[in-house]
Image (cartoon, rainbow, N blue to C red):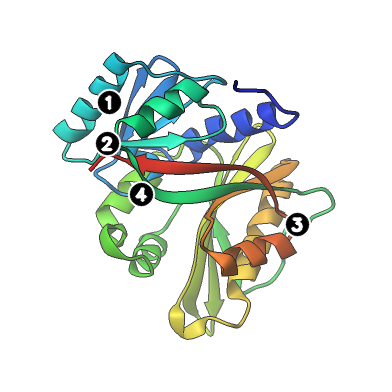
Amino acid sequence: MLTKTDNSELVLGCERRIINAWPALSTLIVGDWVLRFANGYSGRANSATPLSYGAELDGTMLDLIEELYRADGLVPAIRLTPLVADATRAAVLERGYRVKDKSFGQIAPLAGLAASEEPELQIEARPSQEWTAGVAALQSGHKTHVANLAAIIEKVRLPAGFATWLVEGEAVAFGMSVAERGMAEIGLICVDPGHRGHGYGRKIVQGLMGWAAAMDCHSAYLQVEQSNAVAINLYGSLGFRELYQYETRILD
């Protein structure tokens, strides 16, 4: 049986905000689920995500999901979060969906934090072309596609901060945050390989946490792959704790 925990409402709040913090180019609502499509750029923006506690999918809905994603040239993908009903989780596995990746949802308090005054940190309300190109250049595979990244970022409608860390005028690290109703998601943290090991990723995250606090947010949240030990250690040292786990499964 699917059992609610003390964190259930907090998990639901994070998962619903994620849809707005990282928009897809088009969406469809199917029952308690949102289907998101964004030309294959990022897993979250190209998968089915539950929006309610105990979200269910029957055989007809699964057929529709698979048909829609394949029609868009995408592999059917479903995010199995703690919001998913046990029977639906079992049905997805029975169909042969395999694990693409596993992630942690983490959260940290922002009480007492102040906005950064370090001159090397720039946080802008809208992304510049240099910011978008810099982030895309530090990604891999299909995530290097600048236009697809820009298309997602341009759809952000909530207050947002796009951070850049400069070393002698050169942009070497990036990140972003989106604030909504007292909580802010932090994501796209990346550092140029030639400048790693100097704490610039930490500076970006700290700067965005301070920005979120200045936006009257009480908490910051993020998602990180369970295999990314370096990032997990960094976030843990900044006060983030595990709130939940989820996996993205795809049907080849």
Q: Alpha carbon of mark 1 to alpha carbon of mark 4: how far? A: 18 Å
The first of marks 3 and 4 along the sequence is: 4
* Mark 1 or mark 4, whichever is nearer to me: 1
Cβ–Cβ under 8 Å for marks 1 and 2: yes
Please name the residue shown 43% across and 31% down the image.
49
Is 29 left or right of 86, judged from the image as shown? left
Contact, mark 3 vs mark 1 (Cβ under 8 Å): no
Q: Nearer the viewer, residue 77 or 148?
A: 77
- Residue under label 4: 42
On residue 65, the disc is: 1
Give SS at disc 2: loop
| First in residue order: circle 1 vs circle 2 | 1
Q: Quadrant of the C terminus?
A: top left
Whole-angstrom CA distance, mark 1 to mark 2, is 7 Å
Mark 2 or mark 3, which is nearer the start of the sequence? 2
Q: Which amino acid does label 3 sit on?
A: Gly
